[in-house]
Amino acid sequence: MNGNPELLTEMMSAISAINTDNRVILCVPYTMLRGGNAVVMIGAQNVSKYASGAHTGDISAAFVSATGATATIVGHSECRDALGDKNSDVAMRAKMALENDLLPIICVGETADERDMGLTHKIIENGIRESVPENAKSGGFIIAYEPRWAIGKGITPTIKDIESVHKIIRDTLCDMGYFDIPILYGASVNANNSGEIMSIPNVDGVLVGGASLKIDDFIPIIKSVK
């Protein structure tokens, strides 16, 4: 719940001016949704798990699609924490997104308690299997790993931490028959560590938080990703 239309316009202009083959998706508050351009896709930060009806305050995937936006995050760690979203809820949201031609970025991650109990593998694998909807097609969605135990706590996972979880995600996706799904890493990503993070096997991109709010912070991250 940050930014404004002016910042979005400036950000899109700045990104469009750099030489990059990377796919850049800006997921913005609902009031800023619009169509993207040849370089930048615009997405929402969530969509309702319902198609329509008496769900005051919800924003349907159809509403998002009508703005010209082409993607949405679902299952973000903050939505799981604040809204109580379970994997089944995330799957419903992703299903609605796919039915309305939106690319869902499906987030999964384990809490500190789950990690301390040695449940990382189970939580991540179940998160993938239960959050990816039945109508998903290979290449039709993105997975993002958010280590919930590290986000907002000043903790940076090690390269080994990231590599091990991304392998779990890749193995699970392949077992499900999805062989070409991009996997993003998202927690404390900045220009100083993005290049190293991107060198880790099975890390195909990054899900950027606070660093995406300032052009001078975000552009170097985009450039660092090869």
Image (cartoon, grey):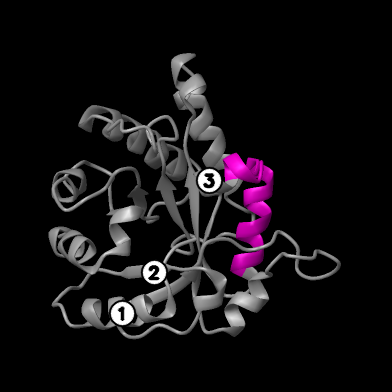
Asked whether the viewer can see residue 85, the reply is yes
**Which residue does the image show at 53% across and 46% down from the upper left?**
78
**Which residue does the image show at 14% across and 44% down from the upper left?**
196
Residue in the foreground of this view, choosing between 4 and 60: 4
138 displayed left or right of 8: right
Q: Are marks 1 and 2 in contact (CB under 8 Å)?
A: yes
Residue 1: x %, y % from top left: 49, 60
Q: CA distance from mark 1 to mark 2?
A: 9 Å
Q: Amino acid at mark 2?
A: Leu
- The answer to which quarter of the image holds residue 40 is bottom left
Judged from the image, the secondary structure of the residue bearing numbered disc 2 is: strand
Q: Quadrant of the C terminus?
A: bottom left
Mark 1 or mark 3: name the one nearer the start of the chain: 1
Judged from the image, the secondary structure of the residue bearing numbered disc 3 is: helix
Residue 26: which disc? 2
Residue 160: x %, y % from top left: 23, 28
* Label 3 sits on residue: 78
**Which residue does the image show at 58% across and 61% down from the upper left?**
46
Q: What segment is highlighted magenta in the picture?
A: 80-98
* Label 1 sits on residue: 12
Q: CA distance from mark 3 to mark 2?
A: 17 Å
**Which residue does the image show at 45% across and 51% down from the upper left?**
178
Mark 3 or mark 2: name the one nearer the start of the chain: 2
